[in-house]
């Protein structure tokens, strides 16, 4: 098996259907592949989606394992030499997957490659970034960031050329291609201490620690119909009322506790 595509679903059935339709029309010729759907205990009924294509398999988790845990569950059931981590809110261009596979195949020094992500209106989504500082949540979640926009722009690499292939610190985990076995720890790709958020930063940090490259590859383009749900409320309300914002802050703490305060 050349490729396993892992998609973790949590209350995203409609977007998942659009994602699967894009994969059905993608150019995956010459690739032996499978699609593993992980229903992460959200209550969505997905069994009928497996009837569309014999290469689609469904795993129903008895509990919500988070993004890292859900992907690890799907990976454990997969057999591809390469693993594509894909959010259900993606719509793939026809050539995107094949281009990512060819790039990783031809560049052994690269451990992780990700595409250029576009918003649903076709505008650029900032999907590669520098490693965060400990003060980043303060800048992004409070009024302080309005007075120091240059720091956030630098973090998000807003002034870099996003038409160029480049080595980066980390890539948004919505769409990542890796090789089986590389970066794995006890047969798991993601550190499950991160229930949601920072699991992608942590994975890319591990790649760098192993002397491998993380590459942003804009020749492959994917639409990411994403909403930043952890920022729905002002920070002074979110830390008390918003579960996703709370998870974000928990993961932020765990990340710096693991990697040091730098």
Image (cartoon, grey):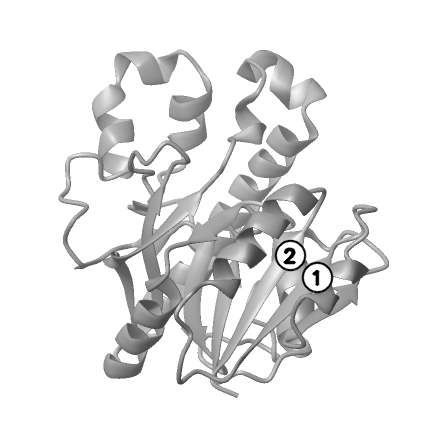
Q: Position of residue 229 (x, y in %)?
A: 57, 29
Residue contact at pointers 2 and 1, CB within 8 angstroms: yes
Q: Quadrant of residue 208?
A: bottom left
Residue in the picture at 77% in, 51% down: 64
The quadrant of the rendering that contains the C terminus is: top left
Does residue 129 appear left or right of residue 205 in this picture?
left
Q: Position of residue 31 (x, y in %)?
A: 44, 82
Q: Quadrant of residue 191?
A: bottom right
Marks 2 and 1, the one that precedes in the sequence: 2
Depth check: give the residue in front, 56 or 194: 56
Residue in the picture at 41% in, 25% down: 140
Mark drawn on residue 8: 2
Residue in the picture at 46% in, 21% down: 141
- Identify whether 197 is placed above or below 164: above
Mark drawn on residue 27: none
Question: Which residue extends farthest bottom?
Answer: 1
Disc 2 to disc 1, C-alpha distance: 5 Å
Residue in the picture at 53% in, 88% down: 1
- Identify whether 59 is placed above or below 135: below
Q: Position of residue 240 (x, y in %)?
A: 69, 19
Q: Residues within 10 Å of mark 1 (few under 14, many from 20)?
A: many
- Identify whether 132 is placed above or below 95: above
- State the residue position of label 1: 38
| SS class, disc 2 | strand
Q: Is residue 121 visible?
A: yes
Q: Position of residue 205 (x, y in %)?
A: 39, 60
| SS class, disc 1 | strand
Q: Residues within 10 Å of mark 2 (few under 14, many from 20)?
A: many
């Amino acid at each position: 098996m050349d490729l396993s595509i892992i998609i973790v679903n949590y209350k995203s059935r409609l977007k998942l259907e659009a994602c699967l339709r894009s994969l059905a029309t993608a150019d995956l010729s010459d690739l032996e592949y499978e699609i593993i759907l992980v229903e992460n205990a959200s209550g969505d009924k997905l069994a009928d989606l497996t009837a569309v294509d014999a290469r689609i398999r469904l795993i129903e988790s008895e509990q919500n394992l988070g993004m890292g845990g859900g992907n690890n569950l799907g990976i454990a059931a997969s057999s591809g030499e390469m693993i594509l981590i894909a959010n259900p809110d993606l719509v793939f261009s026809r050539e995107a997957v094949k281009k990512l596979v060819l790039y990783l195949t031809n560049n052994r020094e690269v451990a992780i490659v990700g595409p250029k992500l576009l918003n649903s209106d076709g505008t650029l989504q900032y999907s590669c970034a520098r490693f965060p500082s400990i003060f980043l949540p303060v800048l992004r979640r409070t009024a302080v960031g309005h007075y120091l926009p240059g720091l956030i722009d630098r973090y998000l690499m807003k002034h870099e050329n996003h038409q160029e292939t480049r080595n980066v610190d980390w890539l948004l985990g919505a769409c990542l291609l890796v090789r089986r076995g590389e970066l794995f720890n006890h047969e798991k790709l993601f550190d499950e201490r991160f229930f949601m958020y920072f699991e992608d930063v942590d994975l890319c940090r591990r790649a760098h620690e192993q002397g491998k490259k993380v590459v942003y590859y804009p020749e492959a383009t994917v639409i990411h119909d994403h909403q930043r749900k952890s920022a729905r409320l002002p920070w002074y309300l979110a830390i008390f009322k918003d579960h996703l914002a709370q998870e974000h802050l928990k993961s932020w703490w765990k990340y710096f506790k693991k990697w040091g305060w730098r």
